[in-house]
Image (cartoon, rainbow, N blue to C red):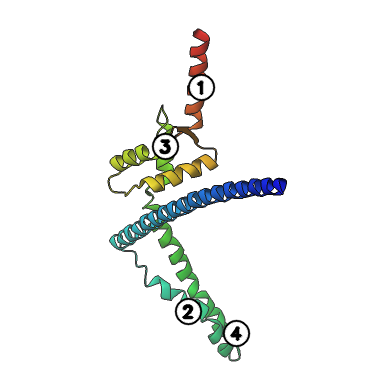
Amino acid sequence: MSETAARTTELTSQYSAQVAGDLERNLKEQERLSGEIEALQEQLAAVRHDHTVLLNLQQALGIPAAPDVPAAEPVTAVPAPRKKTAAASGAAPQAKAKKPAPAKKRTSKKPAAAASTPQPAAPTLVELVREHLAGQDEPRSAAEIATALGQQHPGRAVKTTVVRTTLEGLVAKNQAQRTKQGTSVFYTTPDTAERAAAGDQAGQQSA
């Protein structure tokens, strides 16, 4: 009976440790997903802002966007008149089929002109975090990076949770490295980590 009791206690301790680890991973996953959702919402807001800017530019350039949409409708409605006129004459369908052709060329040229003018787009949070991290010589925490980006881009709402999620995504892609000092987590680029390691080795050899 003592052996079975010992095995039972061992299994209980193993299961409890496994459940505790699973709970911790679950909480981290929830935090990561919530951060990704916030990042996507921020990107969606930026895209919608760009959409309004493009519409304003289109109106300023005098490009009629709404009248071009009905021009494509007669093209889809052409098969109905073709069936009616095919019994009467074969020349009428050809004349109707040729008329919508210039409308297609006009619609293809106008969006090209509108798309070529508003090229500047706001950089994504991933690009901002990667560039800021690459310019640092020492590891930085998510809070430090969020504060720096908030000062550099006052028009954008940069949250620490979103920055931490972005950093974890860069770590998963081997574009950043994570180090832990006590209870704090710091991030750096692989190049910075290699330079720091080479400096430490040079210091040890000189000593």
User: Where residue 128 sits: x, y (%)?
Assistant: 40, 41
Q: Earlier in the sequence, mark 2 or mark 3?
A: 2
- The answer to whether 59 is drawn above or below residue 134 in the figure is below
In the image, taking residue 142 as reference, residue 1 lies left or right, namely right
Please tell me how crowded label 2 is: few (under 14), some (14-19), or many (20+) other residues with Cα within 10 Å. Answer: few
Q: Disc 4 vs disc 1: which is toward the camera?
A: 1
Position of residue 69 in the picture relative to residue 78 (left or right): left
> Looking at the image, is mark 4 or mark 2 earlier in the sequence?
2
Q: Name the residue beneath numbered marker 2.
A: 74
* Mark 1–mark 2 CB contact (< 8 Å): no
- Residue type, label 2: Pro
Compare marks 1 and 2 and give the one earlier in the sequence: 2
Do the residues under discs 3 and 1 have CB atoms within 8 angstroms?
no
- 4 or 1: tag closer to the N-terminus: 4
Question: Regarding mark 4 in the picture, which secondary structure is present there?
Answer: loop
- Using the image as rendered, state which of residue 195 and residue 19 is in the foreground: 19
* Alpha carbon separation for disc pair 2 and 3: 50 Å
Percent x, y of residue 103: 45, 70
Residue at (62, 50) in percent of width and height? 12
Per the rendering, the mark at residue 90 is 4
Front residue of 108/168: it is 168
Asked if labels 3 and 2 touch by Cβ distance under 8 angstroms, the answer is no
Mark-to-mark CA distance, 1 and 2 = 69 Å
For disc 1, the marked residue is 197
Q: Residue type at mark 3?
A: Glu
Look at label 1 and name its amino acid.
Answer: Ala
Is residue 96 depicted above or below 1 in this figure? below
Q: Residue at x 45, y 45 (%)?
A: 166
- Give the SS element for disc 3: helix
- Label 4 to label 2: alpha-carbon separation: 19 Å
Circle 3 sits on which residue?
A: 131
